[in-house]
Structure formats: C-alpha cells, structure tokens
Image (cartoon, rainbow, N blue to C red):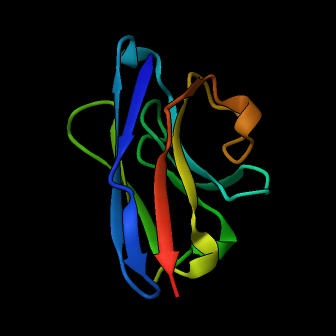
Amino acid sequence: VQLQASGGGLVQAGGSLKLSCVASGRTFGIFRMAWFRQAPGKEREFVAAINLGGSSDGTTYYADSVKGRFAISRANAYGTIYLQMNKLKPEETAVYYCAAAAANYEPTLSTRYAYWGQGTLVTVSS
C-alpha cells in the first residue's frame, strides 16, 4: 500500500485547509486510515482516524485538541480520505502524515499503522 498526502500550505491563524490522502496498491486490505502530525522537535501525535471497513465503517476518532474544528471524511473511492481543518492555530504548524492500518488496532497509536505517506507541511502563521 502506498499513500500520497497533499493539500498542505501556508495559512493564517483562524484559517482553514483541507488535506487529502490517496491510497494505492492493495487498498482492499485497509481497515482504517488516519492523520498524524509532527511539529519540529516534538513527537508524532494522533489527529484523527476513520474506519473504512467492517461493521464499524465510517466510525471516526479525534484527538481532543481538534474536536469541533477538524473533520475527517472519506471519498466514495475506497482508500481516499480528507481532513478539513478549521480555526487553525500557530501551534498546529507541523508535517501532517497519512497512515493506514490493516486491522482494528488502537486508532491513536502510531505504532499500529503499517503504512505511511510522505507527509505534507502545514504552516499556520500568527
């Protein structure tokens, strides 16, 4: 499975951006896709996740820090997800990574995701 993230850029504080991630290859094996982010000098942290398969298809998960401002969604095309980010804050400047998991593991743990994209940089200016 290969993941391609896009949509990052420069935005002012309070603004919005929409990230996209497209999976290719053996996408039928993907159970969940997620977004993580890593700011300079900090550890990678969970942002949001969405289930693509099984009886919990469409179930979403969010970090507390983004609830009510970010929305993860999926396209009709299997293996494509989005992250709508609103009311962005300068401290959310980071490289945003798309990830995919093949089973129903703990959604917030980066170690549970076997596939990763290259990341897209989001810069929020104050």
* Side of 17 relative to 54 (left or right): left
Q: Position of residue 68 (x, y in %)?
A: 50, 79
Q: Is residue 39 left or right of residue 92?
A: right
- Asked where in the image residue 23 lies, by quadrant, the reply is top left
Taking the spot 56% from the left edge, 74% from the top edge, the residue there is: 67
In the picture shown, does residue 117 fall above or below 16? above
Q: Looking at the image, how many numbered discs can be counted on the residues?
A: 0
Q: Residue at x 25, y 44 (%)?
A: 75
Q: Quadrant of residue 18?
A: bottom left
Q: Percent x, y for residue 10?
A: 39, 69
- Residue 85 can be seen in this image: no
Name the side, left or right, on which 44 lies relative to 124.
right
Residue 12 vs residue 29, the one in the foreground: 12
Question: Can you name the residue that lies furthest to the left here?
Answer: 76
* Residue 12 percent location from the top left of the image: 41, 83
Quadrant the N terminus occupies: top left
Is residue 73 visible to us here? Answer: yes
